[in-house]
Image (cartoon, rainbow, N blue to C red):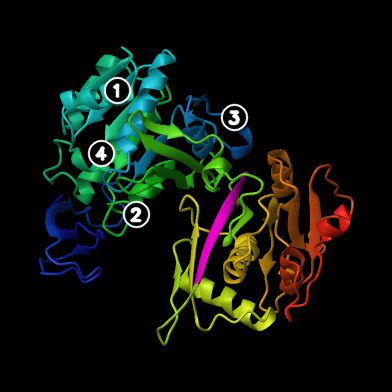
């Protein structure tokens, strides 16, 4: 067989027959690296050895096995993973530098070791002493079942695996390791994929399955570095969001063969490492006394995976002295904010053409669901009128361009969470709930249009006429 020289792009993986300054596929400059491939013999199937005694089973005869999981004490991590770490899985976690991914994996390693399992922490970026100093900072005591190895040779790591026989292997990071059989530099597509394939065989060994978690570097575009084939190869892809210095960290999965990808895990970064937030609702709303009512604040319930979270939306409306008012939103797209403002002006007679509008959420979480639209509008109305909304009142509905309230999915689950947290009133769309649904301690107020909600909450009509709120009538 003859060897043929090709040039492969380290950015997108595109192959080229000869070297050139820029890749014709991704247009990146100086990314082509020389690679040798072996040509297959000519003559059709001549020279190909076929295995005749291959064992093959019918799908109906195949035995289905439930993958065991390693359950950690970090419930937020378990939630995103689908209940824990599958014992024969390969997971990759990525984040911007300084987000805390290495710290999180060190904490998980120590917890797994305390369960009587062996852990090998292999790092191609940090020395043993650096890992030890971080462990002393975030861990109360370091368990003896955690082994560390600092080297970028995956061949040596495989030797450590044979020697320690670990149940969990941490690779930090996969782009820094190399196999001696390949001449490419660390981080090249060939080295990264070959190292990942080798680790996959280690994890999926039927005689000795192991769980492997790899750290993946993130590009400047906030994407996992390397070929897309790396994401296809692994069982789960986790992303830890949160810039360096930010207290709140969010963990979610973009791929998970063993669970849903809609779950979110929340952590706070402190001196003791990452601490799970078991009740996110308390983190995403401001705790105020019953009589401490402020303008520009409204509450809603968003659903992250299977968990409802009570969320506070804050708005600030001010007079502009410029030809074009500002529309600033940290939690929504600018076009989305402009759409909500247009609905308010046209359907609720609230002029905002000369007003700056700023919208944000407590805790910085982004609004992905349409169910928060009513609360976002009510926070703007509250700031515009300089009137506060009662702290025990929540809004859960979408808003159409006609100004009508639209029902949202899993509304009953969201209201049950509000009832558990002690809230008294919730505004929803008309016919948003089944007629047979009842609640014991929370009053559900169905409304048809946005104007009805504004009139009910603030006690005034669009023309300024006083109107009693439903709970005032009950009190009288």
Separation of residues labelled 4 and 3 (CA atoms): 35 Å
First reached walking from the N terminus: tag 4 or tag 2: 4
Rendered residue at 71%/71% (across/down) = 450
Can residue 201 be seen by looking at this rendering?
A: no
Q: Is residue 102 left or right of residue 461?
A: left
Q: Is residue 128 left or right of residue 172?
A: left
Task: Please provide the residue range marked out in magenta.
Answer: 306-317
Label 1: which secondary element: strand
Residue 261: x and y, percent? 52, 47
First reached walking from the N terminus: tag 2 or tag 3: 3
Cβ–Cβ under 8 Å for marks 1 and 3: no
First reached walking from the N terminus: tag 2 or tag 1: 1
Along the line of sight, which residue is nearer the eye, 380 or 157? 380
Label 3: which secondary element: loop
Q: Which residue is mark 2?
A: 228
Within 10 Å of disc 2 (Cα), the crowding (few <14, some 14-19, many 20+) is few
């Amino acid at each position: 067989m003859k060897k043929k020289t090709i040039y492969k792009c380290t950015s997108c993986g595109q192959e080229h027959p000869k070297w050139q300054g820029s890749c014709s596929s991704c247009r990146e400059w100086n990314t082509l690296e020389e690679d040798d491939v072996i040509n297959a013999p000519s003559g059709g199937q001549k020279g190909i050895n076929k295995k005749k005694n291959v064992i093959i089973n019918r799908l109906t005869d195949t035995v289905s096995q439930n993958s065991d999981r390693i359950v950690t004490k970090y419930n937020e991590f378990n939630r995103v993973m689908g209940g824990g770490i599958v014992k024969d899985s390969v997971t990759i976690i990525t984040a911007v530098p300084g987000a805390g991914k290495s710290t999180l994996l060190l904490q998980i390693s120590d917890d797994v070791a305390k369960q009587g399992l062996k852990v090998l922490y292999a790092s191609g970026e940090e020395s043993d002493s650096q890992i030890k100093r971080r462990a002393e900072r975030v861990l109360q005591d370091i368990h003896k079942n955690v082994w560390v190895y600092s080297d970028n040779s995956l061949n040596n790591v495989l030797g450590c695996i044979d020697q320690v026989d670990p149940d969990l292997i941490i690779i930090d990071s996969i782009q820094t390791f190399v196999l001696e059989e390949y001449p490419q530099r660390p981080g090249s597509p060939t080295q990264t994929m070959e190292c990942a394939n080798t680790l996959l065989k280690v994890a999926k060994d039927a005689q000795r399955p192991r769980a492997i978690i790899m750290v993946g570097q993130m590009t400047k575009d906030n994407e996992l570095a390397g070929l897309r084939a790396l994401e296809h190869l692994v069982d789960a892809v986790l992303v830890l969001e949160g810039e360096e210095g930010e207290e709140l960290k969010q963990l979610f999965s973009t791929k998970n063969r063993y669970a849903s990808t809609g779950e979110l895990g929340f952590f706070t970064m402190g001196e003791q490492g990452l601490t799970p937030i078991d009740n996110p609702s308390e983190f995403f709303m401001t705790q105020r006394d019953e009589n401490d009512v402020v303008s520009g604040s409204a509450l809603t319930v968003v659903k992250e995976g299977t968990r409802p979270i009570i969320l506070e939306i804050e708005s600030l409306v001010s007079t502009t002295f410029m030809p074009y008012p500002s529309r600033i939103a940290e939690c929504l797209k600018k076009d989305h904010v402009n759409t909500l403002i247009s609905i308010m002006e046209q359907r609720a007679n609230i002029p905002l053409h000369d007003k700056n509008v700023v919208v944000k959420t407590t805790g910085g979480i982004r609004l992905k669901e349409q169910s928060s639209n009513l609360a976002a509008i009510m926070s703007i109305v509250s700031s515009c009128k300089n009137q506060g909304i009662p702290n025990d009142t929540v809004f859960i509905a979408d808003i159409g361009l006609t100004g009508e309230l639209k029902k949202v999915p899993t509304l009953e689950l969201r209201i049950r969470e509000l009832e558990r947290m002690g809230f008294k009133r919730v505004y929803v769309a008309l016919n948003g709930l089944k007629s047979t649904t009842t609640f014991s301690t929370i009053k559900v107020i169905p409304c048809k249009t946005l104007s009805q909600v504004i009139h009910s909450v603030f006690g005034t009509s669009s023309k300024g006429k006083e109107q009693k709120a439903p709970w005032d009538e009950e009190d009288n």
